[in-house]
Image: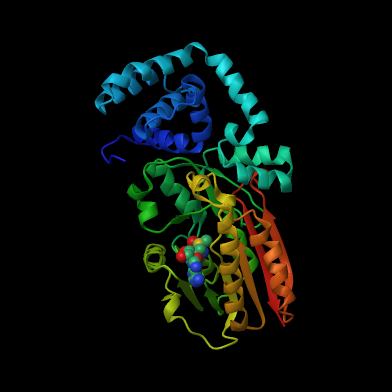
Amino acid sequence: MNAALSPADRALCRELCCGVVRWQSALDWLVARKTGGRTQRADLLNLLRLGLYQLFWLDRVPDHAAVHETVELAKRLGFGSQAGFVNALLRGYTREADETHRALDVLKQTDPHTGWSHPDWLVARWQARLGVADTARLLEWNNTPPPTYARLNTIKTAAAGTLLDRWREEGVEYDFGRWDWIGENSVFRLKSHPSLATLGSFRDGGFYVQDPSTLLAVHLLDVQPSQTVLDLCAAPGGKTMLIAAQMQNQGRIVAVDVDAVRLKLVQENCARLGVTCVETVAVENFDAPPASFDRILIDAPCSNTGVMRRRVDLRWRIRAEEIARLVKTQLALLKKAAPLLKPGGSLVYSTCSLEMEENGALVRSFLAEHPNLALEAERELVPFKDGVDGAYVVRLRAS
Ligand code: SAM
């Protein structure tokens, strides 16, 4: 994105990019019904998607402006001879707006993967488990732009009031939120704000941006200031930062990750948020004797199917066979971590996946081979029921 864009234009640019990726299948369906399904050049198709997205998903751009801009863009990009085709297709749709909206609504019922723009195998998988109605709620959730949430960093700012006063000066508008796994006045929904990087309250580490769902794992980990904690899949450190705050920046947190670049982000976050009790370790250098840790968090790499509203392109990258591969990694991580837990200690395993294979089913098969561990607490956050990103968290206790 062009750094010279005004905040409003930057927001529109973001909306257009994310919207076109989110609604790609439905947009392509609109193109196909006017072109007899003829294959379009990729860049021309993108222009048509951009124009159609503005016509049928955006209210704030008048139709004539959307058509005009798209046609001009076609000319500027060297599609001179095709500009007439772009104009005719878009203008044709402006004359059929009501019936097209109705057709798009019907498509969600008759062909949900196209109507809600998701891969068909994923829709079939969810329908088999959740049923048709709840799957539609999930698909709708995934296509809804997510809010930004900010967690108060108590290491830098003890009282929420201090941060809120600062936000008022900085032009940050927010709402209070309440979630049963999060203390009162510690996570806020940002309604509008200048670019975060320009805010002193952000640069000074007054808050960390994360969805409320991500805090459930730390809540169940239930750390104490003097403990030794292993965060085995730590980067970029969202949960590490909250663990540190809950330990009042005392004790010891070993933050491990396989990705050196992402591990640097943990260090940067520690520096910004004033966290000093964290030691970052690349996985190849990580070594610890058995029974070293009071608490272990495995925030495992997963299919991310619970966070699709935030990762708009994920649906087009995810593959069914990837889930089986991830399950192997997740099991290996559990097996690696289990011996490192002190007797009486707790291990929390979490994902942001909605898939049973990566969650409850995996944990149960793991527990069948580890009788020294007992399931103590388990919770799943389902986006369209709980109103936050999807998450699975389980706490195991070592005897
Ligand atoms: N806990 C992080 C947070 O709250 O910001 C998010 C962790 S993300 C879900 C999963 C992380 O696991 C990724 O950073 C990835 O690099 C890391 N990872 C993948 N395989 C790993 C392995 N075998 N050992 C350690 N880390 C691994």
- Residue 276 found in image quarter: bottom left
What's the colour scheme? rainbow
Q: Is residue 4 left or right of residue 140?
A: left
Indicate the quadrant containing the C terminus: top left, top right, bottom left or bottom right: bottom right
Q: Quadrant of the N terminus?
A: top left
Give the residue at x 59% y 54%. 213
Front position in the image: 165 or 222:
222
Q: Residue at the spot x=35%, y=36% of the render?
A: 10
Q: Please state which of residues 106 and 376 is positioned toward the viewer in this rendering.
A: 106
Report the side of 234 relative to 5 (left or right).
right
Q: Residue at x 49, y 29 (%)?
A: 27
> Where residue 224 appears, x then y in whole percent?
59, 75
**Percent of width and height locating residue 384:** 66, 43
Q: On screen, 3 above or below 246?
A: above
In this rendering, position of residue 391 left or right of residue 365: left
Q: Nearer the viewer, residue 36 or 391?
A: 36
Q: Which residue extends farthest top?
A: 95
Closer to the camera in the image, 272 or 336: 336
Residue 153 is at least partly visible in this image: yes
| 131 vs 61: above or below | below
Vertical placement of 207 versus 68: above or below?
Answer: below
Residue 185 in sight from this viewpoint: no
Residue 56: image location, x then y, percent: 50, 23
Please provide percent x and percent y for residue 45: 40, 30
> In which quarter of the view is residue 366 placed?
bottom right
